Image (cartoon, rainbow, N blue to C red):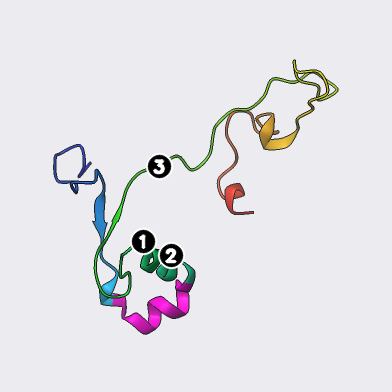
Amino acid sequence: MEIMAGRGTPEGGIYLDASHLGADFIMQNFRGMSLRCRDVGYDLPNAPVVVSPTAHFMMGGLRIDQDCRTDLEGLFAAGEDAAGVHGANRLGGNGGV
């Protein structure tokens, strides 16, 4: 909503400021993310970084028959690749499993 209201960054995102957590906490709990930010010029423990909305996963999948065959000869699909047992979305929390 901030972006849609015109309060986004020039890059099209918003600022995430985690500096109030302290550098030690961030490095202990988010070391990988902090190092990745550093590699692209951001200082996550001490300054705001730009974040933006993105797709987390695709709802849906490949169409299959009862034997998991797709329309492409030799290609089979199952689980989330074929929309999963829960239809075009997964149950809450399953994305983290």
- Left or right of 90: which side holds 5? left
Query: Which quadrant holds the C terminus?
Result: bottom right
Q: Residue furthest left?
A: 6
3D distance between C-alphas at marks 3 and 1: 18 Å
Q: Mark 3 highlights which residue?
A: 54
Q: Which residue lies furthest to the top in this view?
A: 71
Type of amino acid at the residue the image marks with label 3: Thr
Q: Mark 2 highlights which residue?
A: 36
Query: Which quadrant holds the N terminus?
Result: top left
3D distance between C-alphas at marks 1 and 2: 7 Å
Question: Magenta segment: does it hold 23?
Answer: yes
- Binning the other alpha carbons within 10 Å of mark 1 as few (below 14), some (14 to 19) or many (20 upward) gives few
Q: What stretch is highlighted in magenta?
A: 21-31
Q: Find residue 57 and report its horizontal and vertical position in percent.
A: 53, 39
Q: Of tags 3 and 1, which is closer to the observer? A: 1
For the residue labelled by badge 2, is the local secondary structure a helix, a strand or a loop? helix
- Left or right of 20: which side holds 76? right
Question: Magenta segment: does it hold 97?
Answer: no
Q: Quadrant of residue 70?
A: top right
- Left or right of 58: which side holds 20? left
Q: Find residue 48 and report its horizontal and vertical position in percent.
A: 24, 64
Q: Of tags 1 and 2, which is closer to the observer? A: 1
Type of amino acid at the residue the image marks with label 2: Arg
